[in-house]
Amino acid sequence: MLVLLIASAIVASLLVELGLMVVRDQMEASQMLREDEREMNGVFKRTSGGRW
C-alpha cells in the first residue's frame, strides 16, 4: 500500500512538472508572437506612409 502511495505521488509530481513545462512554452510562444506582430506593425507603418 505504501509503494502504491509513493508511486502515485511520483506520477503526480511528474504530471505537474509536465504541465508547468507546457505552460512555460505557451507563454514564451505568445511573447514571441507579440514581438513578431510588433515588428510587422513597424514595417507596415514605414511602408504605408511612403511616397509612390
Image (tube, rainbow, N blue to C red):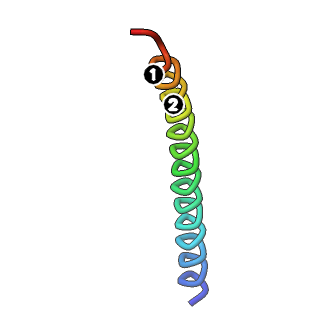
Instruction: Name the element at disc 1.
Output: helix
- Decide: is 35 above or below 23: above
- Decide: is 37 above or below 15: above
Instruction: Give me the residue at 57% from left, 50% from top.
Output: 27
Quadrant position of residue 13: bottom right
Marks 2/1: CA distance? Answer: 10 Å
> Residue 4, how many percent across, how many down?
53, 83
- Identify residue type, mark 1: Ser
In this image, 47 relative to 14: left or right?
left
Q: How many marks?
A: 2
Which label belongs to residue 36?
Answer: none
Instruction: Give me the residue at 54% from left, 25% from top.
Output: 42
| Residue denoted by label 1 | 48
Quadrant position of residue 7: bottom right
- Decide: is 26 above or below 10: above
- Identify residue type, mark 2: Asn
Q: Viewer-proximal residue, 33 or 52?
A: 52
Q: Quadrant of the N terminus?
A: bottom right
**Are the residues flagged by discs 2 and 1 in contact, CB closer than 8 Å?**
no
| Residue denoted by label 2 | 41
Disc on the earlier residue, 2 or 1: 2
Q: Label 1: few (<14), some or many (≥20) within 10 Å?
A: few
Which label sits in the foreground, 2 or 1?
1
Q: Quadrant of the C terminus?
A: top left
> Residue 46, how many percent across, how many down?
52, 18
Q: Viewer-proximal residue, 38 or 15?
A: 38
